[in-house]
């Protein structure tokens, strides 16, 4: 039997949520299908307006109603239990249709996948997207210890998306060979030359860049993501004041929406930075803004491996990031970007200012290094091959 039938388990999926973990599940599923795999995503739905089953780009999607996101547990424990029962019953009827279970994120869905793996003798791997996922699972209310022990015992392979996550897993006394590192991936449809050719056109259109020489020499910083706590947006804006004080044409564009948007906009006004910091809200053409910019800023306190950072580097942006999980793997300090050590409030202003004052030739060299980092190590084609090799190794053992 040619075993190419994969069941992805994701607590939520598009169109209910578009987070980084879900996007990686979607991208990997597409690539696997291109490599002749059959992929089904088992997920939840909080409303009956969404169909129980449908095909999204040839991906079979099965939604079990839960009312609220099942991975939250806590006060939503009833939803978690309903989803668990629904998943088990559904799999009991379809167990012969799958060869391997691939779980996205080690939260409640990992417990569901682990038990299905045990009961129906199907190998399961779980992708850990956050440095503290296993710790968080263990601390979940009164059931935490049970969830934690079950996941540790019954998951065949844990996939760590960063070096830090891989190191953290050593603290959990997992069996030798049970942890493998496979990073997140990104599509890279344009060559570096094509990106450079589009840059000025996109700047004129998106940033309304003045064609006068002094404006063309200005520097453009970009930040993309949820406007929420832990993203350090206020700190980034304050740090950018150092750049604005030396370069009156420099601008920081913030793309994204969230609960802090109004507070951020008020903060920009209060600091007198309205001419330098533009809060764009949600935009569909994020890649176009990335092509138009020079630098990408990621000041988050915690990330697994940021999809936005991968996207930014895939079009050659010079990244400026907090020295955290994922970023430390992607960024070669002072070569393709800058890693900022804590405390950020002391170190970020100086690094942003230093970057803004680099000669254009040096910026172009760093942009090429950034682009090459992705093309050589992190494209979806490369990451998908690693998963296919992992599946084959699991099939061989089982």
Image: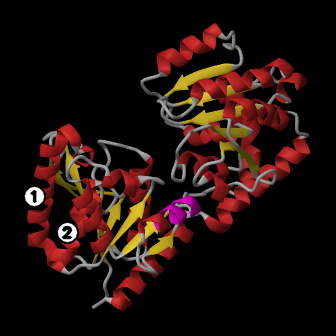
The x and y percentages for residue 218 are 82, 28
Q: In the image, is residue 131 above or below residue 342?
A: below
Indicate the quadrant where residue 87 lies: bottom left
Q: Secondary structure at mark 1?
A: helix
Disc marking residue 314: none
Few, some or many C-alpha atoms within 10 Å of disc 1 (few <14, some 14-19, many ≥20)? few
Q: Which residue is mark 2?
A: 115
Q: Residue at x 55, y 57 (%)?
A: 186
Residue range (magenta) = 163-169
Q: Residue at x 31, y 44 (%)?
A: 15
**Mark toward the start of the polypeptide (1 vs 2):** 1
Q: Residue at x 72, y 28 (%)?
A: 204
Foreground residue among 136 and 44: 136
* Residue 143 colored in magenta in the image: no
Q: Secondary structure at mark 2?
A: helix
Q: Nearer the viewer, mark 1 or mark 2?
A: 2
The x and y percentages for residue 205 are 67, 29
The x and y percentages for residue 248 are 82, 18
Q: Is residue 121 visible?
A: yes
Taking the image as shown, residue 145 lies to the left or right of residue 396, namely left
Q: Residue at x 14, y 68 (%)?
A: 91
Spatial CA span between label 1 and label 2: 11 Å
Given contact means CB atoms under 8 Å apart, are the residues at marks 1 and 2 in contact? no
Taking the image as shown, residue 326 lies to the left or right of residue 389, namely right
Q: Which residue is mark 1?
A: 85
Identify the main secondary structure in magenta: helix
Q: Is residue 30 visible?
A: no
Few, some or many C-alpha atoms within 10 Å of disc 2 (few <14, some 14-19, many ≥20)? many
């Amino acid at each position: 039997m040619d075993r190419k039938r994969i069941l992805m388990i994701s607590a939520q999926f598009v169109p209910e949520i578009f987070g980084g973990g879900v996007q990686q599940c979607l991208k990997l599923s597409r690539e696997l299908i291109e490599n002749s795999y059959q992929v089904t995503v088992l997920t939840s739905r909080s409303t009956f307006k969404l169909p129980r089953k449908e095909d999204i780009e040839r991906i079979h999607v099965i939604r079990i109603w839960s009312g609220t996101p099942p991975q939250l547990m806590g006060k939503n424990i009833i939803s978690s239990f309903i989803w668990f029962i629904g998943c088990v019953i559904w799999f009991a009827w379809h167990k012969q249709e799958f060869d391997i279970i691939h779980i996205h994120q080690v939260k409640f869905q990992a417990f569901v996948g682990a038990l299905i793996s045990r009961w129906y003798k199907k190998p399961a791997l779980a992708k850990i997207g956050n440095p503290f996922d296993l710790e968080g699972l263990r601390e979940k209310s009164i059931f935490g210890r049970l969830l934690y022990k079950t996941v540790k015992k019954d998951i065949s392979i844990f996939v760590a998306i960063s070096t830090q996550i891989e190191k953290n897993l050593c603290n959990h006394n997992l069996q030798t060979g049970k942890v493998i590192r496979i990073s997140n991936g990104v599509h890279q449809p344009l060559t570096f030359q094509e990106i450079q050719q589009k840059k000025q056109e996109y700047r004129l259109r998106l940033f309304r860049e003045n064609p006068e020489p002094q404006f063309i020499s200005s520097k453009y910083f970009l930040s993309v993501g949820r406007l929420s706590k832990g993203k350090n947006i206020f700190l980034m804006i304050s740090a950018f004041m150092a750049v604005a004080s030396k370069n009156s044409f420099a601008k920081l564009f913030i793309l994204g929406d969230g609960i802090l948007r109004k507070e951020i906009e008020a903060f920009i006004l209060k600091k007198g930075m309205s001419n330098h910091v533009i809060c764009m809200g949600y935009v569909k053409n994020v890649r176009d803004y990335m092509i138009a910019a020079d630098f990408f800023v990621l000041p988050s306190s915690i990330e697994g491996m940021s999809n936005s950072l991968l996207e930014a580097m895939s079009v050659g942006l010079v990244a400026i990031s907090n020295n955290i999980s994922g970023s430390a793997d992607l960024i070669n300090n002072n070569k393709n970007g800058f890693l900022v050590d804590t405390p950020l409030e002391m170190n970020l202003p100086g690094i942003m200012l230093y970057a803004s004052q680099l000669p254009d030739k040096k910026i172009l060299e760093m942009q090429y290094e950034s682009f090459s980092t992705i093309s050589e190590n992190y494209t979806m084609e490369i990451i998908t091959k690693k998963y296919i090799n992992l599946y084959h190794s699991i099939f061989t053992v089982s």
